[in-house]
Structures are given as C-alpha cells and as structure tokens.
Image: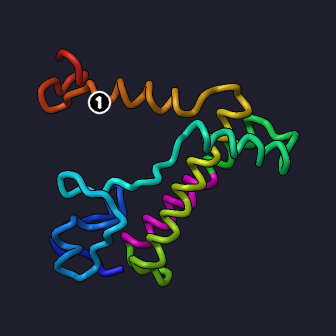
Amino acid sequence: MTICDKHNFYDRETDLPCKKCLKELGEYDEDVIWEDEEPIWENKINLNDLQQKFYIWLEHNFPNTTKDAQLIGVMEELGELSHAHLKLKQGIRGATVEKNLSEIKDSIGDIVIYLINYCNVSGLNFEECVQKASDEVLKRDWIKYPENGVNK
C-alpha cells in the first residue's frame, strides 16, 4: 500500500490514510463506509464473539493451559513487539518499514489473543475489561489536570 505523505498513519487505529489522500492516490475503496474522513469498517470485530471463538480454540488446542501460560505469552509477544520497534528505530538487522510493520502488527494481534485467552482462563469478560479501562482513561485530561488527570 502507498504510504500517505501527509499523515503518519502507522500510529492510527486503522491502517489507511484519510479518504482525501486515498482518492488522490486512486486507492479509494467504495466498500468502506466513511464518516468525518475516518474509515468505519462494515464488519467490525465483536469482542465477545471473538472471546468465545478463542475459548473454543483454546479448549481444543490447549485444554490444560493456565493463566501463567497466557501471561507469559503476552510477555513473549511484548518482547517481539519491542524488538521489531527497536530494530526499526535503530535501522539495523535488515529492518525496513514494511518488514517491521508486519512484525509489529503480528505481535499486537498476538498480544490481544493472549490477553483474551488470559481472560478465558480467568473467567473474565475481555470486552468488559477493555470498556472499563477505556471509560476511566477517556475521563482523564492530562493537559487540564497534569497532576492526576482528573482534578489536579
């Protein structure tokens, strides 16, 4: 995919530049629903459904897994993410944006899967965990309240 020179889209939630830039590049996809220049995919992932799918997958493939095994998996993948990020930043070991971005995306996906399975083994609802944390974080305004993000 062509990289948008006007935006650093690697840090964005989607993996696309804005609609205007896509049109300029001739890569605008009509299958995407657009709202305020941000792509909104028709087939969003439902976290509860995803957790259920991984519950079944985990029971089939690793019926005796533990919370520890899932947490260690998160840490392993975090190490892989850190390694790909560092090598790209340093520009060594054959690092390229394309290669390392692929490794970074893979690591992020694997981290989420391990976290979902940690929740499965622990009896937690992944979506509730994400929603609770999101609600708390989005209430914080570190510019207005630099001491604690809430009232100081």
Which x, y percent locates residue 37? 19, 58
Q: Which image quarter: residue 63?
A: top right
Query: Which quarter of the figure is the N terminus placed in?
Result: bottom left
Q: Nearer the viewer, residue 17 or 121?
A: 17
Describe the element under mark 1 as helix, strand or loop. helix
Extreme residue toward the front, this view: 30
Is the residue 149 above or below the residue 59 in the image? above
143 sits left or right of 139 in the view: left
Which x, y percent locates residue 107? 55, 59
State the extent of the magenta-drawn residues as a range: 76-89
The kind of residue on which mark 1 rests is Leu
Query: Which quarter of the figure is the C terminus placed in?
Result: top left
Is the residue 98 above or below the residue 118 in the image? below
Kindly identify which residue carries mark 1.
138
125 magenta-colored: no
Q: Residue at x 77, y 43 (%)?
A: 56
Q: Residue at x 84, y 51 (%)?
A: 61
Which x, y percent locates residue 41? 39, 55
Which x, y percent locates residue 119? 65, 33
78 magenta-colored: yes
Q: Residue at x 23, y 74 (%)?
A: 22
Q: Nearer the viewer, residue 11 or 131?
A: 131
Is the residue 86 above or below the residue 115 in the image? below
Extreme residue toward the top, this view: 151
Q: Which image quarter: residue 106?
A: bottom right
Which is the main secondary structure of the residues drawn in magenta? helix
